[in-house]
Amino acid sequence: MSDPAFPRWIAIVAVRLAATAGALFGVVLLARAGTLAPRLLGIAIVLSALWMIATVPRALAHRWRSPK
């Protein structure tokens, strides 16, 4: 386990799982919201979680890329 790629892979997977959990929380909030304010909050949470799923793992992989 001296490979430095394994902890980095675990970190990327953890970011994806956390963002997925955030998106699910936003969807639940949207489904249960009775007024406009919680619905807007749910939409904001879902959109930010989707952005996090799409960009953060790629940014981490780019940051940790080995020099050629």
Image (cartoon, helix red, strand yellow):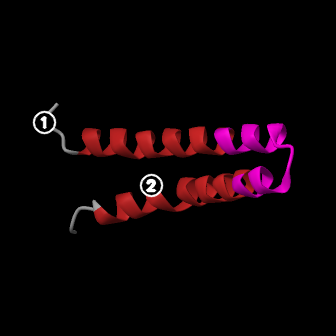
Kindly give the residue lying farthest to the left in the view shown: 2
Q: Is residue 19 left or right of residue 32?
A: left
Q: Which residue is mark 2?
A: 57
Residue 13 position, x and y percent, is 44, 40
Q: Helix, strand or loop at disc 2?
A: helix
Residue at 26% across, 40% down: 7
Type of the residue with mark 2: Pro
Q: Is residue 33 magenta?
A: yes
Taking depth in this image into account, of 68 and 54 the one nearest to the observer is 54
Residues in magenta, as a range = 25-41
Q: From what the image shows, is residue 7 above or below residue 45?
A: above
Residue at 75% across, 50% down: 38
Kindly give the residue lying farthest to the bottom in the view shown: 68
Helix, strand or loop: magenta stretch: helix
Residue 16 position, x and y percent, is 50, 44
Disc ID at residue 2: 1
- Residue neighbourhood size for the residue with mark 1, other residues' Cα within 10 Å, grouped as few (<14), some (14–19), many (≥20): few
